[in-house]
Amino acid sequence: MQLTLLLLLALTTGLVLRASPAQEKPPAAALSAEVRRLEAWVGTWDAEVSMLGETSKGIEVCRLECGGLWLVTEHTGSFMGAPYQGKGFTGYDAQKGAYAGVWIDSTGGPMSTYANGRFSADGKTFTAEVEGAGPDGEPARFEYRSTFPDARTRTFEILPVGAGKREPILSIRYTKRG
């Protein structure tokens, strides 16, 4: 009987050790420097939005998902006196050597997309040329520009591309919480 118990204990211990999740889980792949740059956005941010001479407040929460490969951005606030919700996804396309992203929101306009996002050499400015809709609802091109003066402050601007003034259509100043 003692031999049976010892055998059972040895078999059980061996099975538990072999089935240990820590041993079965492969090590996480190292993220590239380009993907790690997305960390600059991560956190909860208070937003002051300026557009068409009006200023409103909002909150933006940014986090990395899908193994740290995708930045998910969720913005809530108000736009022209109405509740506003927007959501964006940004990732790095290693084959193209550029960042790609999409933005959708509650204004009912078409989704904005880009596949050519780049950081400046010092990592403090991100720009992308975006396909979207202009104020008249017609297809238009814009530049998204984010700056990171320090770890607790960032800005975002939408500028027109092409003829006309290069003044921001929309500006947001963010202050990181915590």
Image (cartoon, rainbow, N blue to C red):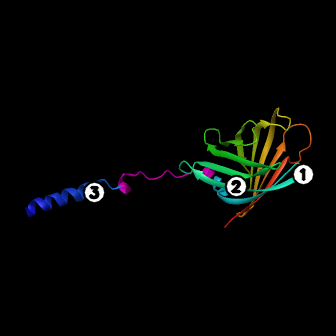
Q: CA distance from mark 2 to mark 1?
A: 21 Å
Q: CA distance from mark 3 to mark 2?
A: 44 Å
Q: Which sits earlier in the primary sequence, circle 1 or circle 3? A: 3
Q: Is residue 27 left or right of residue 135?
A: left
Q: Which residues are magenta?
A: 21-37
Q: Amino acid at mark 2?
A: Glu
The residue carrying mark 3 is 16
As drawn, 136 above or below 76: above
Q: Which sits earlier in the primary sequence, circle 2 or circle 1? A: 1
The residue carrying mark 2 is 60
Q: Amino acid at mark 3?
A: Val
As drawn, 59 above or below 162: below
Q: Secondary structure at mark 1?
A: loop
- Mark 1 or 3, closer to the camera: 1
Residue 78: x and y, percent? Answer: 77, 51
As drawn, 152 above or below 52: below
The residue carrying mark 1 is 53
Q: Secondary structure at mark 3?
A: helix
Of residues 59 and 133, the one nearer the viewer is 59
Decide if residue 106 is in sight here: yes
Q: Residue furthest left?
A: 1
- Mark 3 or 2, closer to the camera: 2
* Mark identifier at residue 95: none
Q: Residue at x 83, y 37 (%)?
A: 134
Number of other residues with Cα within 10 Å of mark 3, as a class: few under 14, some 14 to 19, many 20 or more: few
Q: Residue furthest right?
A: 164
Which quadrant does the N terminus fall into?
bottom left
Residue 166: x and y, percent? Answer: 89, 45
Q: Residue at x 80, y 40 (%)?
A: 142
Q: Amino acid at mark 1?
A: Gly
Number of other residues with Cα within 10 Å of mark 1, as a class: few under 14, some 14 to 19, many 20 or more: few
